[in-house]
Image (tube, grey):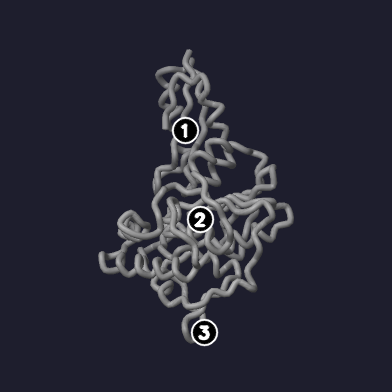
């Protein structure tokens, strides 16, 4: 008898990690019924993070936010950690048509705000990945109470195209993060700017033309200057949402895959395994 750990990520737009793991296990059992199969549906901080953690931690509670959408929720874990997933409300799979310049992260920010104001939350894991936008998280920060004004003192709009208009950032009405802080779980190590940056590498997947890629990269560079925060590896995650949350909300960056491996019990499950299917 062999010990087999089945730990797939989701198949974007086709099947959840839970469904994929179950299908693999069913197929394996059909030819090797005596093997010990351990199913650990996995995620790296992108879509499916909440489902994977719910499967691993059945005591986790869903906190629904019907004002955002009927199915919008975040998870409250036993250790007072809130897990909020960007892809659930601001993900690319939710768009009927790609909108590289106008897509934004406002709904994700609404989830973060709800978690931050919850009395039972000590810290927040913000799972980034699968985003539809390149807005540096400005939409999310707006939902958190930050104000972004242009040179005339008027509020800028939502979407990556608006970032270049930002002249002033006001944080007086911003919701404070929980005492334990905010950790953004990233699925890439891309910086915000440049040839390896989020606009250049990922915006084309979100529908951006070459000209729009250049416009977005220039807008992001402008935002870096306004925020006064340095670019770094991982800052480009989710269209730069990692950068925005770190620059203005004090978040720190951590590998989504490594963190979810710990939270899901994958690290302990693979000890002594004869085979791991990912």
Residue 87, x across and y down, in percent:
48, 54
Judged from the image, the secondary structure of the residue bearing numbered disc 3 is loop
Residue that appears at 63% across and 50% down: 82
Marks 3/2: CA–CA distance: 30 Å
Q: Earlier in the sequence, mark 2 or mark 1?
A: 1
User: In this figure, which residue is indicated by the disc labeled 3?
Assistant: 153
Callouts 2 and 1 close, C-beta under 8 Å: no
Label 1 CA crowd tier, 10 Å (few <14, some 14–19, many 20+):
many
| Foreground tag (1 vs 3) | 3
* 169 or 24: nearer the viewer: 169
Q: Is residue 74 rendered to the left or right of residue 256?
A: right
Residue 237, placed above or below residue 67: above
The answer to whether residue 131 is seen in the rendering is no
Residue that appears at 53% across and 52% down: 85
User: In this figure, which residue is indicated by the disc labeled 1?
Assistant: 7
User: In this figure, which residue is indicated by the disc labeled 2?
Assistant: 86
Q: Is residue 59 rendered to the left or right of residue 268?
A: right
Return the residue found at the far right.
Answer: 119
């Amino acid at each position: 008898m062999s010990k087999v750990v089945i730990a797939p990520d989701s198949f974007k737009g086709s099947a959840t990690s839970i469904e994929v793991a179950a299908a693999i296990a069913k197929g394996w059992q059909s030819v090797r019924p005596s093997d010990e199969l351990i199913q650990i549906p996995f995620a790296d901080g992108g879509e499916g993070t909440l489902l994977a953690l719910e499967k691993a931690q059945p005591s986790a509670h869903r906190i629904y936010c019907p004002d955002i959408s009927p199915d919008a929720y975040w998870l409250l874990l036993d250790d007072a950690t809130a897990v909020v997933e960007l892809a659930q409300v601001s993900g690319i799979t939710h768009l009927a048509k790609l909108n590289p310049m106008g897509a934004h992260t406002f709904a994700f920010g609404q989830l973060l705000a709800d978690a931050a104001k919850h009395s039972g939350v000590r810290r927040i894991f913000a799972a980034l990945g699968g985003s539809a936008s390149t807005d540096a998280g400005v939409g999310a920060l707006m939902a958190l109470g930050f104000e972004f004004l242009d040179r005339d003192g008027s509020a800028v709009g939502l979407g990556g195209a608006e970032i270049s208009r930002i002249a002033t950032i006001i944080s007086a009405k911003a919701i404070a993060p929980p005492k334990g802080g905010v950790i953004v779980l990233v699925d890439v190590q891309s910086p915000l700017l440049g040839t390896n940056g989020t606009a250049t590498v990922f915006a084309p997947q979100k529908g951006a033309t070459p000209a729009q890629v250049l416009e977005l990269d220039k807008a992001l560079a402008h935002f870096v200057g306004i925020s006064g925060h340095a670019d770094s590896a991982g800052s480009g995650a989710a269209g730069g949402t990692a950068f925005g949350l770190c620059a203005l909300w004090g978040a720190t960056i951590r590998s989504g895959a490594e963190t979810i491996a710990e939270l899901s019990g994958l690290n302990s499950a693979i000890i002594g395994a004869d085979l791991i299917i990912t």
